Image: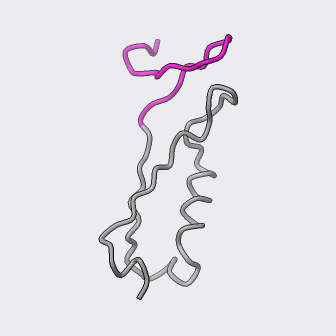
Amino acid sequence: MELRDSVDLFSIMTYDFTAAFSPGPTAPLFWIAETVMKLIPPNMRQGHDSKLMIGLNLYGYDFKKLGGKEALIGSKVK
């Protein structure tokens, strides 16, 4: 028996790729694709129902020059 036989869905978070000490995108597409491909065995990539639910980010960060970060939300975007 495999783990996938015992669960309804696997939920993964595909965000927070970067941090204040290394500013950049929160969820670059190449990273999301690599993460998903690592979790799905090659023999399960076509013709099978997936049990993988991907959490996508709907935010960004405003990295400050002196370090640290704060959430960048719609009302702060100019």
Residue 47 image point, x, y percent:
44, 83
Picture layout, residue 35 above or below residue 47: above
* Magenta-colored span: 58-78
Image point (63%, 26%), residue name: 20
Would residue 10 be counted in the magenta stretch?
A: no
Quadrant in the rendering for residue 25: top right
Q: Is residue 68 left or right of residue 45?
A: right
- Seen as rendered, the residue at the extreme left is 8
Quadrant in the rendering for residue 21: top right
Residue 52 image point, x, y percent:
41, 65
Picture layout, residue 71 above or below residue 1: above
Picture layout, residue 48 above or below residue 55: below
Q: Is residue 3 left or right of residue 67?
A: left
Image point (44%, 31%), residue name: 59
Would residue 63 be counted in the magenta stretch?
A: yes
Residue 55 image point, x, y percent:
41, 50
Residue 22 image point, x, y percent:
69, 30
Picture layout, residue 2 above or below residue 59: below
